[in-house]
């Protein structure tokens, strides 16, 4: 059986992935560097006795330089081993439509999740905080911190006149939207907010946050917007 799990809601897709893999002997590969021969050998190798095997390839279709070759291989590959392609973003329909005989599951974030990120400007403190509290009912504060870091990092790069590969691949309307959002901050306040988010991530990983993360993000949103 072959699965493709993709979409922006990585918390839910990871949970679904864990359920799929329960009770299996697992092999995990990085899609950016794995070779077709390596994947083929892993799928064809037999487990001991009745041992259930599973192979997971992360971000193969979004980061591999040989995507077309892999799609051709995947469309013809046959194996009793469970194969799961996991992506940390939504794939284009041109990609998903090119795959055959694969169970495709998309995990999309709700509209208000993106509204939370899009309204992240000093003049919208009350709205941002309200959306943040609503999101905490469903999503872990760690995921919200990750999303905040990603969005504010993009705003900082654009405000500095720079560009990343992610920004370069954006459609013009999305880049323009981010540029407008960035202009609603002063450069110093934006950089300070980003630094505070980075500090929160470091302290979270080292167990040095003075309060739980959800409360810490409360304070950051209310004091920097």
Image (tube, rainbow, N blue to C red):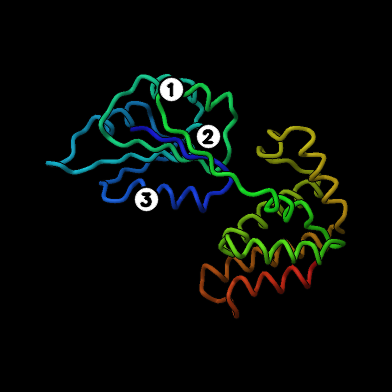
Disc marking residue 208: none
Viewer-proximal residue, 162 or 24? 24
Residue displayed at 39% across by 38% down: 84
Percent position of residue 174, x then y: 76, 38
Tell whether label 2 touches label 1 (CB within 8 Å): no
* Closer-to-camera residue (220/1): 1
Q: Choose between 20 and 215: the one closer to the eye.
A: 20
Q: Which residue is mark 2?
A: 63
Mark 1 surroundings: few (<14), some (14-19) or many (≥20) residues within 10 A: some
The Cα–Cα distance between marks 3 and 2, rounded to whole angstroms, is 25 Å
| Dot placed on the residue nearer the N-terminal end, 3 or 1 | 3
Q: Which numbered disc covers residue 100?
A: 1
Mark 3 and mark 1 residues within 8 Å of each other at the beta carbon: no
Q: Nearer the viewer, mark 3 or mark 2?
A: 3
Q: What residue does disc 3 label?
A: 19
Image coordinates of residue 55 in percent, x first then y, are 33, 39
Marks 1 and 2, how far apart at CA: 20 Å
Pointer 3 or 2: first along the chain: 3
Disc 1 is placed on an element classified as loop
Q: Secondary structure at mark 2?
A: helix
Q: Residue furthest bottom?
A: 210
Disc 3 packing (10 Å; few <14; some 14–19; many ≥20): few
């Amino acid at each position: 059986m072959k699965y493709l799990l993709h979409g922006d809601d990585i918390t839910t897709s990871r949970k679904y992935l864990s359920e799929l893999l329960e009770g299996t002997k697992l092999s995990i590969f990085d899609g950016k560097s794995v070779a077709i021969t390596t994947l083929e050998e892993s799928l064809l190798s037999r487990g001991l006795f009745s041992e259930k095997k599973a192979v997971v390839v992360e971000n193969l279709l979004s980061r591999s330089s040989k995507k077309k070759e892999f799609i051709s291989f995947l469309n013809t590959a046959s194996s009793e081993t469970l194969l799961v392609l996991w992506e940390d973003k939504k794939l284009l329909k041109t990609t998903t439509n090119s795959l055959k005989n694969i169970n495709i599951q998309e995990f999309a974030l709700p509209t208000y999740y993106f509204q939370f990120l899009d309204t992240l400007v000093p003049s919208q403190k009350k709205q941002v905080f309200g959306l943040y509290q609503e999101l905490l009912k469903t999503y872990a504060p760690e995921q919200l911190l990750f999303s905040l870091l990603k969005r504010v990092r993009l705003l900082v790069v654009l405000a500095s006149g720079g560009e990343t590969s992610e920004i370069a691949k954006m459609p013009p309307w999305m880049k323009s939207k981010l540029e407008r959002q960035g202009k609603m901050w002063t450069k110093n306040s934006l950089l300070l907010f980003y630094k505070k988010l980075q500090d929160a991530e470091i302290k979270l990983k080292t167990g040095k946050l003075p309060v739980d993360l959800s409360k810490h993000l409360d304070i950051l949103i209310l004091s920097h917007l």
